[in-house]
């Protein structure tokens, strides 16, 4: 299937063509299937493709010159936006958290990749970055970059929710529970809105804090969801040896790579809840692999410095 844009034809793999994989652990009798959204596109991977799809359409149909967005040092959204901009010949600008990163672009795999795709950067302090959702700050950015279309951190807006609704298809109605990792809340909101009322959507936040409930409620049209806050491993991009061992064992057993920031934590959580009996082995579970594999290289840099095991 092709998404037809006015400048470039961006090829992607439809959800109906993504082969689900049964991930039954040898220690558990379970009905867990994984939808490999990371295979949807080579460089604009997983849920980032979904979130960008309709935003990119708006950019081209309304004649915006470029895209301005936000992210941290290893942001999947920054990498995907840069890749999409290169493919569609749209200039991209990333507002990056941390002024110290300005001198570390070449040693940071995510930023180096985004730069190779043509993305320009503006590095800001963490205090300034916290204003990323403030109207006055956004107005200043729009004044400084008058013909740039602004996409929020993580890509989450109404157009992103519309794209994420397309993750679930008719054949997914057989599942009792649908699981996904949660960052900014856009992906789970799309899943909630396209799910059946009888299905339960469980999100596994990768950050500490209860603020996500309010963010999701801004977009969700149903109440058949809950967040499981027990598997963030200390916060965003925080890992420990148990999580790394799980990710490496999962890849060995199922031949499926998991990223340590999002999908690794979700799958760890699902297996742990099954082991504890919180999720019944008879429950049909669909787990959404949202991508994020580009972040493994950067995580391994940090693990190496800490003399910890690396992610295979």
Image (tube, rainbow, N blue to C red):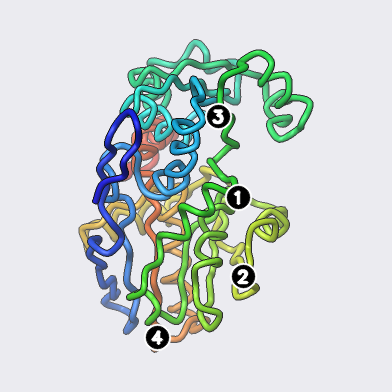
> Could you give the CA–CA distance between mark 4 and mark 1, rounded to whole angstroms?
27 Å
Closer to viewer: mark 3 or mark 4: 3
Q: In this orientation, which residue lies closer to the viewer: 206 or 151?
A: 151
SS assignment at label 3? strand
Earlier residue among tags 2 and 1: 1
Residue 151: percent from left, percent from top: 57, 34
Measured Cα–Cα span from mark 3 to mark 4:
42 Å
* 156 left or right, relative to 268: right
Q: Residues within 10 Å of mark 3 (few under 14, many from 20)?
A: many
Q: Residues within 10 Å of mark 1 (few under 14, many from 20)?
A: many
Residue in the image at 57% along x and 45% along y: 156
Residue farthest toward the top in the current orientation of the protein: 103
Q: Earlier in the sequence, mark 4 or mark 2?
A: 2
57 relative to 140 in the view: left or right: left
Q: Of the residues under marks 3 and 1, which one precedes in the sequence?
A: 3
> Looking at the image, do the residues carrying marks 4 and 1 touch, with CB atoms under 8 Å apart?
no
Position of residue 312 relative to residue 282, above or below, is: above
Residues at marks 4 and 2, CA–CA distance in whole angstroms: 19 Å
Q: Residue at x 60, y 75 (%)?
A: 224
Q: Which numbered circle lies on residue 69? A: 3
Give the residue number, with chain letter if any, for mark 4. Answer: 281
Question: Sequence order check: which comes first, mark 4 or mark 1?
Answer: 1
Looking at the picture, how far across and down is residue 5, in whole percent? 35, 36
Q: Nearer the viewer, mark 4 or mark 2?
A: 2
Mark 2 element type: strand
Percent from the top left, x then y, of residue 3? Answer: 31, 44
Residue 135 position (above or below residue 164)? above
Question: Would you name the residue on which mark 1 appears?
Answer: 207
Tell me the element at label 1.
loop
Q: Nearer the viewer, mark 3 or mark 1?
A: 3
């Amino acid at each position: 299937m092709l998404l037809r844009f006015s400048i470039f034809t961006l090829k992607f793999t439809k959800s109906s063509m993504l082969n689900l994989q049964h991930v039954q652990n040898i220690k558990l009798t379970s009905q867990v299937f994984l939808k490999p959204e990371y295979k949807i596109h080579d460089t604009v991977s997983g849920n980032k493709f979904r979130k960008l799809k309709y935003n990119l359409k708006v950019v081209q149909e309304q004649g915006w010159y470029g895209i301005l967005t936000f992210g941290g040092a290893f942001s999947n959204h920054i990498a995907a936006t840069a890749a999409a901009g290169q493919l569609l010949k749209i200039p991209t600008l990333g507002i990056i958290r941390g002024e110290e990163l300005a001198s570390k672009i070449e040693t940071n795999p995510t930023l180096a990749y985004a730069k190779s795709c043509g993305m320009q950067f503006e590095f800001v302090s963490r205090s300034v970055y916290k204003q990323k959702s403030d109207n006055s700050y956004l107005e200043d950015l729009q004044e400084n970059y008058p013909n740039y279309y602004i996409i929020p951190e993580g890509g989450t807006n109404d157009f992103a929710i519309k794209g994420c609704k397309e993750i679930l298809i008719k054949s997914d109605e057989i599942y009792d529970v649908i699981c996904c990792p949660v960052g900014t809340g856009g992906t789970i909101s799309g899943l909630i809105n396209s799910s059946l009322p009888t299905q339960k959507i469980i999100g596994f936040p990768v950050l500490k804090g209860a603020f996500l409930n309010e963010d999701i409620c801004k977009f969700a049209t149903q109440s058949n969801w809950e967040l499981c806050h027990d598997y963030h491993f200390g916060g965003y991009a925080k890992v420990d040896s148990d999580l790394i061992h799980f990710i490496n064992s999962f890849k060995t057993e199922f031949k499926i790579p998991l990223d340590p920031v999002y999908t690794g934590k979700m799958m760890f959580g699902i297996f742990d809840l099954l082991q504890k009996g919180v999720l019944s082995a008879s429950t049909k579970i669909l787990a959404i692999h949202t991508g994020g594999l580009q972040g493994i290289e950067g995580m391994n840099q940090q693990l190496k410095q800490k003399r910890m095991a690396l992610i295979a």
